[in-house]
Image (spheres, rainbow, N blue to C red):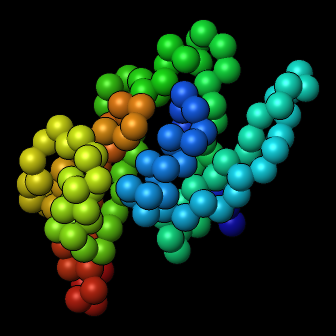
C-alpha cells in the first residue's frame, strides 16, 4: 500500500501562504516547525491540508532566483491542483468573498461542477463539486 502524503508548492513567503490556505481556503495548518536547508540554512517545514484529507501541501519558500522564477508557474500555466468540495456553491461564494481570483465561471461537466481559480502565487486550481452520483450509492 502507498499513500501520497505531501505535494510541495513553492511560495514567496510563508505567512501570506498560510493565511491564504488557512483563512481563505479553510485548510488546517498541520505543521509549522523550524527546519534547515540541505546546506544548513534556516527554513520552516509548513504543511497545510483540507480538513479530513490525508494528502497535504508542503509550503516551500522559494530559495534562490530559479525557484523565485517558477513561483506561480509550477504547472506551466495548466491546472495542477484539484480541490473537491462537498458544497460547491457555498465554497465558491466563500472564496469569492475572500477575494480568490476565479478565471472561469462555474460550469457543469461530466465529472461535476467546476471553476478554475488562482492561488496567491498564480498557480491554477480546479474547484470541483461532488462527483455525479456522489452520496447516491452510485459507483
Query: Relative to 72, is 66 above or below?
Result: above
Measuring 31% from the left and 39% from the top, which residue is drawn there? Answer: 118
Residue 47 x, y percent position in the rendering: 64, 52
Q: For the N terminus, which image quadrant?
A: bottom right
Query: Relative to 65, is 34 above or below?
Result: below
Q: Is residue 98 left or right of residue 8?
A: left
Measuring 26% from the left and 47% from the top, which residue is drawn there? Answer: 99
The total number of labels drawn is 0
Q: In which quarter of the view is residue 15 placed?
A: top right
Residue 97 x, y percent position in the rendering: 22, 56
Is residue 91 visible to the viewer in this orientation of the structure? yes
Q: In which quarter of the view is residue 78 placed?
A: top left
Determine the residue located farthest toward the top in the rendered image: 65
Looking at this view, is 56 or 122 the one in front?
122
Q: Is residue 41 left or right of residue 120?
A: right
Determine the residue located farthest toward the bottom in the rendered image: 137
Query: Relative to 63, is 83 above or below?
Result: below
Measuring 83% from the left and 31% from the top, which residue is drawn there? Answer: 42
Query: Relative to 26, is 86 above or below?
Result: below
Looking at this view, is 47 or 138 the one in front?
47
Residue 122 x, y percent position in the rendering: 36, 31
Is residue 3 visible to the viewer in this orientation of the structure? no
Residue 116 x, y percent position in the rendering: 23, 44
Q: For the C terminus, which image quadrant?
A: bottom left
Measuring 49% from the left and 58% from the top, which residue is drawn there? Answer: 22
Amino acid at each position: 500500500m502507498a499513500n501520497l502524503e505531501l505535494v510541495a508548492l513553492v511560495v514567496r513567503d510563508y505567512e501570506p501562504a498560510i493565511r491564504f490556505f488557512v483563512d481563505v481556503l479553510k485548510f488546517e495548518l498541520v505543521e509549522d516547525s523550524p527546519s534547515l536547508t540541505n546546506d544548513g540554512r534556516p527554513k520552516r517545514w509548513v504543511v497545510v491540508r483540507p480538513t479530513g484529507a490525508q494528502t497535504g501541501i508542503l509550503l516551500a519558500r522559494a530559495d534562490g532566483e530559479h525557484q523565485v522564477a517558477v513561483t506561480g508557474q509550477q504547472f506551466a500555466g495548466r491546472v495542477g491542483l484539484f480541490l473537491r468540495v462537498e458544497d460547491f456553491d457555498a465554497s465558491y461564494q466563500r472564496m469569492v468573498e475572500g477575494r480568490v481570483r476565479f478565471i472561469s465561471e462555474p460550469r457543469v461537466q461530466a465529472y461535476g461542477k467546476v471553476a478554475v481559480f488562482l492561488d496567491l502565487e498564480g498557480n491554477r486550481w480546479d474547484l470541483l463539486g461532488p462527483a455525479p452520483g456522489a452520496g447516491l450509492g452510485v459507483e
